[in-house]
């Protein structure tokens, strides 16, 4: 299933290829303070493919905090968090904010409970490597 998405103003667009023909996509609300403030809800799949394009790189904010192992791609013009990336062993991994999906039936998005409290940085990177999208290309970055 190909899912198109974008920030509100269209500066950051993507196509996410969700593998298989599952009729449900598990999603999780990130509990970190930053994502709570935005209401971001993410999904990923280790066999998924993410192709993204930035029109104006100067209107994109790439935000890190805490351990700094994840980078949030936030449109600086319209304020949407579109996805987050993490580089693990030289490979870019990603999770996508399902709030930026366009043209899909939201009934297929099924919330899952998660609790990553107490996770070490090593545990966190290992979990991302297992679960996050591993085939990520972002065009238009400087
Ligand atoms: Zn935007």
Image (cartoon, helix red, strand yellow):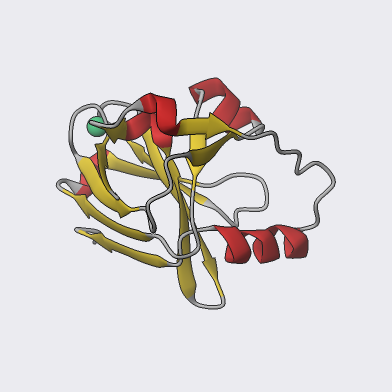
Q: Residue at x 40, y 60 (%)?
A: 48
Q: Position of residue 111 (x, y in %)?
A: 58, 30
Q: Residue furthest bottom?
A: 89
Q: Nearer the viewer, residue 33 or 104?
A: 104
* Image quarter of residue 97: top left
Q: Position of residue 2 (x, y in %)?
A: 26, 50
Q: Residue at x 51, y 66 (%)?
A: 87
95, above or below 50, in the image = above
Q: Describe residue 108's horizontal placement relative to residue 79 as left or right.
A: right
Q: Quadrant of the C terminus?
A: bottom left
Q: Nearer the viewer, residue 43 or 91?
A: 43
Q: Nearer the viewer, residue 1 or 139?
A: 1
* Image quarter of residue 10: top left
68, above or below 129, in the image = above
Q: Residue at x 32, y 34 (%)?
A: 101
Q: Position of residue 95 (x, y in %)?
A: 47, 49
Q: Describe residue 58's horizontal placement relative to residue 21 as left or right.
A: left
Q: Residue at x 64, y 29 (%)?
A: 33
Q: Describe residue 129's horizontal placement relative to residue 40 as left or right.
A: right
Q: Position of residue 54 (x, y in %)?
A: 21, 50
């Amino acid at each position: 299933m190909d899912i198109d998405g974008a920030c509100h103003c269209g500066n950051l667009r993507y196509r996410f290829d969700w593998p298989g023909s599952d009729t449900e996509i598990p999603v999780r609300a990130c509990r970190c303070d930053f994502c709570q403030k935005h209401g971001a809800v993410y999904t990923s799949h280790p066999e998924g493919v993410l192709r993204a394009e930035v029109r104006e790189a100067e209107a994109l904010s790439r935000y890190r905090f805490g351990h700094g192992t994840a980078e949030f791609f936030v449109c600086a013009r319209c304020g949407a968090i579109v996805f987050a990336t993490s580089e693990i062993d030289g490979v870019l991994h990603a999770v996508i904010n399902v709030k930026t999906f366009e043209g899909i039936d939201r009934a297929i998005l099924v919330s899952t409970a998660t609790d990553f409290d107490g996770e070490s940085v090593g545990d966190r990177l290992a979990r991302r490597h297992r679960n996050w999208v591993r085939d990520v290309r972002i065009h238009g970055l400087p």
